[in-house]
Amino acid sequence: MLTFALQSGSNGNCIYVEAAGTRLLFDAGISGAQAKERMAAHGRDIRQVDAVILSHRHRDHTACAGVFQRLFKLPLYATPATHHAITRHTGRLGNVHHFRPGQTLAFGSVRVHTLPTPHDAAESVAFVVTCEQKRLGILTDLGHPFAELATALAELDAAYLETNYDPQMLAEGSYPPELKARIRGDSGHLSNDEAAALLKRCRRQRPKWVAMAHLSAHNNHPDIALQTLRRELGHDYPLYTTSRYHVTDVLAV
């Protein structure tokens, strides 16, 4: 299984996974031109993608779902609530396949388990992609460290894991109090500290590598996130950082 993040952050999200001849995109929060260019940088043609799977309705994950479909003729997979909500900004969508949170989707020999999350969007989900006994988690917009998340992490070979904010930066930053409360609340985002604590709990069962994802531009910094996780996991643990502006290297699972 191979994967790379085309982009990750509140300005747009899109992650590519390839396994056993199946090519999947998770979320469509970046422009069609960006997606095409960043996939081509790794020798992939976006028109050969088999499906785009949406995690929830927020625009940083869905803004260009209609563009992906119209330009590249890609089928979309979404929950009914997500599909209904995004048509306000995507316009009418065709070739949409519905799934329910908790359902497992099948694409050839690849399975995508949808994990319900307590994020503040109806029917929000994270993903576990399985193929040939390899398991990759795409775990962002998580709300808080709910019990099923810790269980899932301990069973993964690799993961994109939300490290959205540094608590001190958020507290001292310029966001209004209600937005700060939403971010650190039970339906907001995971902090660096929460992500580190979750991985530490996995002990020997933790993923073989983790890519820190969905970092805030205003309330976090890659170096701070890295330092926080290193403090709990040690300097030898393989950690990568996704970017708000660039495609990552190809990672093997």
Image (cartoon, rainbow, N blue to C red):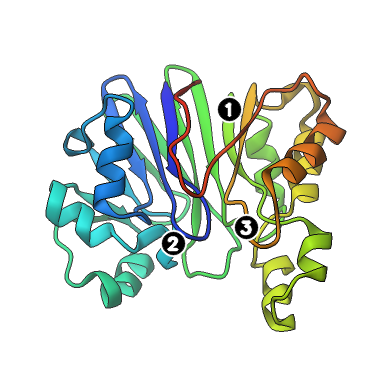
Q: Is residue 135 above or below residue 60?
A: above
Q: Amino acid at mark 1?
A: Ala
The residue mark sitting in front, 2 or 3, is: 3
What residue type is disc 3 on?
A: Ser
Name which quarter of the figure residue 82 lies in.
Answer: bottom left
Q: Which residue is mark 2?
A: 60
Categorize mark 1 by other alpha carbons within 10 Å: few (<14), some (14-19), many (20+): many
Secondary structure of the residue carrying tag 1 is strand
**Residue 16 placement (x, y as % from top left):** 38, 36
Q: Quadrant of residue 131?
A: top left
Sequence-wise first label, 2 or 3 = 2
Q: Is residue 95 visible?
A: no
The N terminus lies in quadrant: top left
Closer-to-camera residue (122/247): 247
| Image location (x, y in percent) of residue 44 | 26, 28
Mark 3 in CB contact with mark 1 (< 8 angstroms):
no
The image position of residue 25, as x and y in percent, is 34, 41
**In this view, 157 is above or below 100:** above
- Element class at badge 3: loop
Residue 237 or residue 173, whichever sits in front:
173
Q: Are marks 2 and 3 in contact (CB under 8 Å)?
A: no
Dot 2 amino acid type: Asp
- Location of mark 3 (residue): 216
Which residue corresponds to mark 1?
A: 158
Residue at 30 percent across and 66 percent down: it is 83
Q: Give the secondary structure at mark 2.
A: helix
Q: What residue appears at the point 25 percent right and 51 percent down from the top-left corner? A: 32
